[in-house]
Image: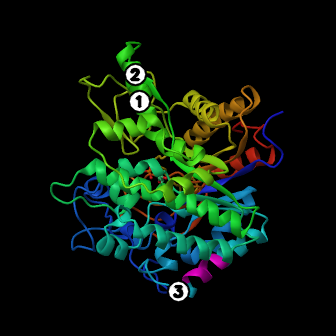
Amino acid sequence: MGFRKDFLWGGATAANQCEGAYDVDGRGLANVDVIPIEDRAEIVTGKRKMLDFEEGYFYPAKESIDMYHHYEEDIALFAEMGFKTYRFSIAWSRIFPKGDEVEPNERGLAFYDNLIDELLKYDIEPLVTITHFDIPMHLVTEYGGWRNRKVISFYERLCKVLFNRYKGKVKYWLTFNEINMLLHAPFMGAGIVFDEGEHKEQSLYQAAHHELVASALATKIAHEVDPNNKIGCMMAGGVHYPLTPKPEDVWGAYTSDRENLFFIDVQARGYYPNYALKYFERNGIELEISHEDKAILKENPVDFISFSYYNTRIGVAEDAEVENVESNLFQTPDNPYLEKTEWGWPIDPLGFRTTINSIYDRYQKPLFVVENGLGAVDEPDENGYVEDDYRIKYLAEHIKQMRDAVDLDGVDLLGYTTWGCIDLVSAGTGEMKKRYGFIYVDRDNYGNGTLKRSKKKSFNWYKKVIASNGEDLSNN
Ligand code: BG6
């Protein structure tokens, strides 16, 4: 009983939140580089245009924790914890600096060659996110981001390079990080900055369609290059609870869930669900979907479903007047039954079990939890040691619920990677102060610090969790 023997324990990061070296070895500028710590929400949502560095702003992705030059040291620490897998993402503009070139940038590829070889040296299975909120800036300014159909073929080119280059080395791939986030953070999720008077939903769903077709094409190519490849979709998970048992609130929660599941419905089943087609019709959204697109979607469903889980949300009646709080770029009413993190995110371990089950019930495909964790303020001592019992408690409670989902509910779960296994830049706020790691990195919100890495208390705790295959969650 318990987790499968080959359960993939590990941690997760994203290129723009940890690599730094934004202009090194031929890397081109990307959307994520020009998102500063200030006015961040306005920019990631595409409401405010910032297409280059501007005076008076701090851009955390430029240097981040400089994993580009520290990956050997960082991977050695992951190996010491006993990681079975490490999830990282490819910075698209390292491989194709502008995005529309024909030949890839060898120096950019060399970085990932080395990183992957370093992982394999320790028998750590690479889990690669092909794009984690990034797109080369040239594709934003010249093509309008994922709104433009042409971007599909540029992404296809990236995939071909990656699948061929890493054949036999990388088996697990995720096509787009949190694909449903595109609706909430269009600049981050799709390189979209809205024009005056633009029909926003029309653009968002057309961009979504392009990403969905691109994802299916990636699945097709991956299987052609190597039938052993396993391709996953990835969504920002977390079920909606109804605000009250009032049927209108229950319906609100149901439809809010579908707003997220829509993406996975297409990726896992291979076609647009009727409720989405009807929604488009009612809202004047006319998508360009060719017969060929439909065939590609139909023939190439994903092999497994991955998702992040931080919290549950609340759904309400359409006409309800409630105050919202913000949690991971989603607007949701407060849940008074749950404790909150220092950033106001609800903490809901049982909601994790509910979320895992609801996804498994719907698709009956293997699942992979690729993000979960607690963003908190850490107070290191003079050696960089942090007594992060709060993090241990959070993770232990969530792993316990995940174990119940496997043991008591029979969910087929491939693995679990905690978010930000090493401290990195927050996607939502741009801060360093919001830390998730087992490894402390000496750097503050504005780039001061030595970048020295040190182990927190949770480091040895997670090592024990992995060694016991999730049986020993005690904190002693
Ligand atoms: C997920 C993203 O939404 O949440 C990550 O995939 C992000 O990129 C993580 O970092 C945690 O959010 P935040 O805002 O605390 O960094």
Say what secondary structure mark 2 lies in. helix
- Residue assigned mark 3: 103
Regarding residue 128, the answer to whether it shows in the image is no
- How far from the left and from the top, in percent, is residue 252? 37, 25
Local packing at callout 3 (Cα closer than 10 Å; few below 14, some 14-19, many 20+) is few
Say what secondary structure mark 3 lies in. loop
The residue carrying mark 1 has its beta carbon less than 8 Å from ligand 1: no
- How far from the left and from the top, in percent, is residue 147? 34, 61
Q: Which region shows up in magenta?
A: 108-113
Q: Mark 2 touching mark 3, by CB under 8 A?
A: no
Tell me which corner region of the image, top left, top right, bottom left or bottom right, holds residue 46: bottom left
In the image, residue 105 above or below residue 192: below
| Sequence order check, earlier mark of 3 and 1 | 3
At a point 41% along the width and 70% down the height, the residue shown is 150
71 relative position to 37: left or right: right
- How far from the left and from the top, in percent, is residue 122? 78, 67
- The amino acid on which the numbered mark 3 sits, given as a three-letter code, is Glu
- Residue assigned mark 2: 251
- Residue at the outermost left position: 196
Q: Mark 1 touching mark 2, by CB under 8 A?
A: yes
The N terminus - image quarter: top right
Local packing at callout 2 (Cα closer than 10 Å; few below 14, some 14-19, many 20+) is some
- The amino acid on which the numbered mark 1 sits, given as a three-letter code, is Thr
- Residue assigned mark 1: 255
Pick whichever, 463 or 307, lies toward us: 307
Local packing at callout 1 (Cα closer than 10 Å; few below 14, some 14-19, many 20+) is some
Tell me which corner region of the image, top left, top right, bottom left or bottom right, holds residue 401: top right
- Cα–Cα span, label 3 and label 1: 44 Å
At a point 44% along the width and 26% down the height, the residue shown is 254
- Cα–Cα span, label 2 and label 3: 50 Å
